[in-house]
Image (spheres, grey):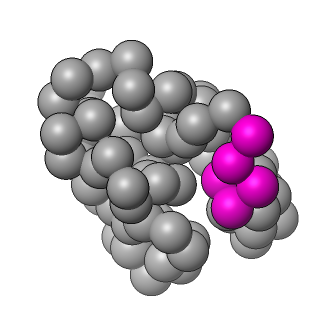
Amino acid sequence: MRRFTLLTRPGCHLCEDFEAELMAEFEGRLEVESAHVDSDPAWLAAYDLSIPVLLAPDGSFVCAVRPDSAAVQAVLDRPAAA
């Protein structure tokens, strides 16, 4: 199972909806770990006002604001890194 990172902020209802929608569609196929976007200067610089942002297991950008099913599926279809 692949672990994605969801960049959020406390109290972000859009972030909560994003995660719920993602988990409903991909149940049992991925894990989501929430991380505070302000906790990393690089994340803050890149994604400050774009949250929620979903990052692939390798840290690359997948999608923002709304889940992109095709983009998530493309990551799931890639061979897992060793």
Q: Provide the major secondary structure of the magenta segment.
A: helix
- Residue 80, image x and y in percent? 33, 40
Residue 42 versus residue 12 in the image, above or below: above
Q: Is residue 21 above or below residue 23?
A: below
- For the point 37% across and 37% down, the residue is 57
Front in this rendered view, residue 4 or 9:
9
| Front-most of residues 13 and 26 | 13
Front in this rendered view, residue 32 or 45: 45
Residue 11 x/y as whole percent: 75, 40
- Left or right of 58? Residue 33 is right
Where, by quadrant of the figure, is residue 22 drawn? bottom right
Residue 14 belongs to magenta span: yes
Q: Can residue 38 be seen in this snapshot?
A: yes
Residue 58, position in %: x, y? 26, 36
Q: Is residue 27 left or right of residue 78?
A: right
- Rendered-image quadrant of the N terminus: top right
Q: Residue at x 68, y 33 (%)?
A: 10
Whole-percent x and y of residue 13? 76, 55
Please tell me whether residue 27 belongs to the stretch shown in magenta.
no
What range of the chain is rendered magenta? 11-15
Q: State which quarter of the image contains the C terminus.
A: top left
Instruction: Give the residue at x 38% y 56%.
Output: 49
